[in-house]
Image (spheres, rainbow, N blue to C red):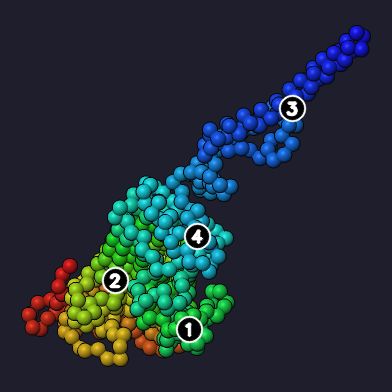
Amino acid sequence: MMITFKLRSLTFFIFIAFSIWCSSLLEPCNARKGGKQYWRQNKGALRKEQKGYGGNHHRHPAGPRVSTTPLRGDNYITPEETAAKLQKNSGGNSNVFNVLDYGAKGDGKADDTKAFEAAWAAACKVQASTINVPSGSVFLVKPISFSGPNCEANIVFQLDGKIIAPTSSVDWGSGLLQWLEFTKLKGISIKGKGVIDGQGSVWWSDSPTYNIPADQTYSSSQDTVIESDSGKMPSTKPTALRFYGSDGVSVTGITLQNSPQAHLKFDACTNVQVSDISISSPGDSPNTDGIHLQNSQDVVIFGTSIACGDDCISIQTGCSNIYVHNVNCGPGHGVSIGGLGKDNTRACVSNVTVRDVKMHNTLTGVRIKTWQGGSGSVQNIMFSNIQVSEVATPIMIDQFYCDKSKCQNETSAVAVSGVNYVNIQGTYTTKPVHFACSDSVPCTGVSLDTIQLKSVDEGKQLYDPFCWEAYGELKTSTVPEIDCLKKGKPYSSSTGAQSGSSDSC
């Protein structure tokens, strides 16, 4: 009996111990089973965090830890994360669009054109938006047009990096008139400390006036040799930066250099301000105007330094209410109105003031140039406080302008009237004053006040002041003496009346 009782008791205790042991084994197993069931029910909606999985699960009595982040791959970035990234890169502003966020590489080699286009497309949808071109990067951008008919107003192009033009002829086709163009915008600003580099030396090599061999072109600003990597460049050379048909345009702080042709052009624009910019290309780079104005009104240019191979500032037909002040010019061809009236066209320019300008080593100082055969007028012009140094001809009106070896004589001309020269001083290398006016449409209302011009050759005067059919008055004595200016107004022998006007504007 005793033996039987002991066996039964032992069996009972073994059974109890086995049950307890089994229970301890089933608990983590059921937990894992429940976890698997949970994930099956929520697959594609939830994902596991790495901690708590991947081995020794029975050591975590609290069970599995889960996350509510969607399961879409390790590299998936949610729209919220993308927005946060854009917000961070834009300094926390939702209206700032960084070109790097749209795929730009900024290494100076990869084509970043599509990234700029995408950033522009996004910015166009937001009023008062900013496109950020960050510092420390070089962006290779092919010819591009930033068009504005469907854009919101007041877009800012914050340029702190560097934009360079392609040097392969393949990217230019048979030739384009502009590289970077902004069209039909209401309120557009480009500002910053960045650079727009046209890498123009690959275009200049075919010019007889450019002194670098055609097979090895030189960029003076970069101290490097630039070569076209795909044949000869097209004969049509582009302007680096052009604004067309826009109102409320501002360009501030940036540098433009080495444009294939004109650096900065405004065509059919109103309310334009250019300030504190720098324009630079070699003095022998052909047709590289600094700033070119055409059919534009209410323009202010100040605080700017320009060195180029053509006119520092060129004012063409259709311009009025132009104010230029505190500008440094040279090398270059000075500040010019014209040429106007080419191919018998009608040209109109009025209300232009150029003052507080310094010119060094330029072909001319302040100049008006018109072609024979044109019509229209240039009127109400003021040149004042002009300091010249080693300028070939500081003061010039040329109604016989011709950029070819020979031009046909014409009787009609663009009329020039109401031109005032005040306080123009400094040195010249060829001729102090040159007034060559039309026989049929003479210059009228020309006034000279406080003119002090001396030859750089130790006071030796190379050529006397020249006047032809120029009418006006000397308000003060001049150095040198200018005694060729006619008084009064011209008289027409054919009509018996005073002449000096052409087709009015």
Secondary-structure class at tag 4: loop
Q: Which residue is mark 2?
A: 316
Q: Which amino acid type is shown beneath numbered disc 4?
A: Ala
Residue located 27% across and 73% down the image: 446
Q: Nearer the viewer, mark 4 or mark 2?
A: 4
- Tell whether label 1 touches label 4 (CB within 8 Å): no
Q: Earlier in the sequence, mark 2 or mark 1?
A: 2
Q: Gap in Å between the C-alphas at discs 2 and 1?
A: 31 Å
Residue located 58% across and 32% down the image: 37
Q: Earlier in the sequence, mark 4 or mark 2?
A: 4
Secondary-structure class at tag 2: loop
Q: Earlier in the sequence, mark 3 or mark 4?
A: 3
- Pick out the residue farthest to the front: 1
In the rendered view, tell whether residue 60 sits above or below residue 14. below
Mark 2: few/some/many CA within 10 Å (<14, 14-19, 20+): many
Q: Earlier in the sequence, mark 3 or mark 1?
A: 3
Residue 141 seen from this side: yes
Q: Which residue is mark 3?
A: 25
Residue 104 - label: 4
Q: Nearer the viewer, mark 4 or mark 1?
A: 4
Q: Which amino acid type is shown beneath numbered disc 1?
A: Val
Mark 1: few/some/many CA within 10 Å (<14, 14-19, 20+): some
Residue located 34% across and 84% down the image: 465
Q: Position of residue 218 (x, y in %)?
A: 52, 81
Q: Which amino acid type is shown beneath numbered disc 2?
A: Gln
Residue 456 - label: 1
